[in-house]
Amino acid sequence: MNQKRARWRKLDNAAKLFLAASTKRDTRVFRFYCELKEEVKKEILQKALDQTVETYPVFLSVIRKGLFWSYLEMSSLHPEVREEYKEPCSRLYIRDKKSLLFEVTYYKKRINFEVFHVLTDGTGATEFLRELVKNYLYLAHKDDGLTDVKLRAEDVTVQDQENDGFVKYYTKNTKKPRQKKERAYQLKKPRKENGPLQVRERILSVSEVLKRSRELGVSMTVLLSAAMIQAIHEEMTRLQEKDPVVLMVPVNLRKFFPSDSMLNFFSWIESGYHFGEKAGTFEEILAKVKTDFKDKLTKEKIAEHMNELIALEMHPVLKFAPAELKNLCIHAGAKFSEKNTTAIFSNMSSVVMPGEYVPYIERFGVYTSTPKMELCVCSFGDQLSLGFTSRFDTENIQRNFYRILKEQGISSRSVEEEFPEPETPRELEMRIYKIFTFLCLAAIVFMIDLDFSYKPTVRWTLFTAGGTASMWLATTIGFFKRHNLLKNAMWQLVIVTGVSILWDYLTGWRGWSVDFVLPIVSMGILLAMVVISAIRRYPAKEYMIYLVMAAGYGLVVPLLLLVFGAVQLEWPSLIGIGVCFLFLIGIVLFKWKEFREEMHKKFHV
């Protein structure tokens, strides 16, 4: 497919939430995988991936930061297949590091597709993995007579894939009073904060689950939701029953609003049971969940909820707030809203492959990172794969869940989770940084103690302590911003000049910081950025904003100091101001198209 992609696009409503709420432990990454009946060959999988991204080029995007919102930008990065090397659902997005938001790995017979939820949802991930597996099996077995089957409609364009369903179907609602949500029961079992994500998988028979669901007059999702609620309740004390058990259940909006989008396009409903108000037999829980689904899974209710989310995003105060402030507010809101749910149940529905490909496939499976407990479900043929994930040091809820299903005539079989020993370079880096921080702190404390003890005439001890603190600060900025050399340079410009002015002030103010350090360092950093951009062969979109920021800093700050009479020796500042001014004029004259596009992206609302 050689269709034109958008050079950049805004984040959809859900993506903005996932980006702000993601952390090192709550990565907002989920894994969709396919277990084959044969060992995976890396070279063939790489060729299959190359073909797949040609079909779905929207996945070749990276996150860039703007003043008001971050955005996704087209990238020339090429995805490389690797043998599985880290904990499932580990972080894919690292701030300031330009990297793709998905990864394809393999382990023995398993093909793993992991993706940051900012990029797509379960439906988009399913379509990508289906295409990837189809391409792999065709390349591996075309000599055996396997034919290349098209999985996607021919008339679906890249523009269709990039379409934002939230914006397309948004209608401005009249304001309705919001119902206050009751705080849900929260799992209190010990957390495995530093341990790996717990992944527990089992397989059910789709026919058994459907048979029992039909006998009870409910859907498969309602049956499994009720079983999960009861399984959680069996671990609660009487005092804990004062709060209801509430499940969050994601809903694919494409079932209500037609869309071929590969972006996030889902909402959710909440269903629960308050055991403190009445005893809950399985039949009573099932009836309550069935009613919740019937009342909330209507096009009107779903549209109302979707419009509420979009309206919040478009609120003038939030819309024009700086991105960092917005992200802090969204993250705080996400943490607060977690109190409204106990756990998450996500039904990814069935994965369908062409008949001639089915004999080569064992099963599909899915699970996700989560700060809570989450159950993800998908089916292939008669196999219903269930993946429990949590960081809670208990398996009692999972045990209860499968026992309840067994009582309903639904048997299950275990899946042996096989994961390689993960690499830990990031942990080693952090350990070294923490040792460095401790040594710097120890040196500062020692120098301050020495100063109090001996009180030297020349306070070299305090100067040494201050120098150590300055070195630690500059090194810390360099460490955490090392993935983006230009941003690192910008931070060093602000830190070095700021610390110099502070030192000058604390040592009796002789003016050397503003007379010499500020203009010289400003021009030096600007030159360094130009050299880095040339050596790394950065395109204009990579370096433009940082050059503008550095030149603007070197122009505005010395100019203000000159105006207010803080500078004693004026010629270094005048030279620096002139250089930075000419640099900005040069950018506007010779790179106007790139300059205008970058400003539009960075300041879009």
Image (cartoon, grey):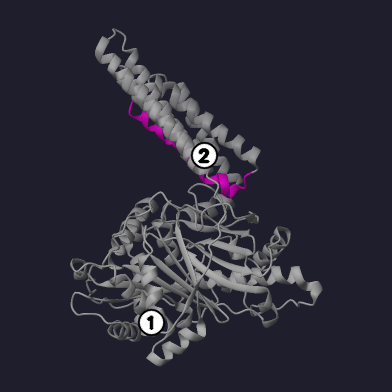
- Relative to 57, is 193 above or below? above
Which secondary structure dominates the residues rendered in magenta? Answer: helix
List the single residue furthest toward the right.
Answer: 143
Q: Name the image quarter holding residue 467.
A: top left
Q: Name the image quarter holding residue 250.
A: bottom left
- Relative to 329, is 567 above or below? above
Q: Name the image quarter holding residue 530.
A: top right
Q: How many marks?
A: 2
**Is residue 566 inside the magenta stretch?**
yes
Q: Is residue 114 left or right of residue 476?
A: right
Packing grade of label 1 (10 A; few <14, some 14-19, many >=20) is: few
The residue to which callout 2 is attached is 482
Q: Is residue 551 visible?
A: no
Q: Is residue 373 left or right of residue 156?
A: left
Q: Secondary structure at mark 1?
A: helix
Which label was assigned to residue 407? 1
**Is residue 363 inside the magenta stretch?**
no
Quadrant that contains the C terminus? bottom left
Q: Amino acid under label 1?
A: Glu
Q: How far across and how far down the image is residue 303, in percent?
A: 38, 79
Residue span colored magenta: 538-567
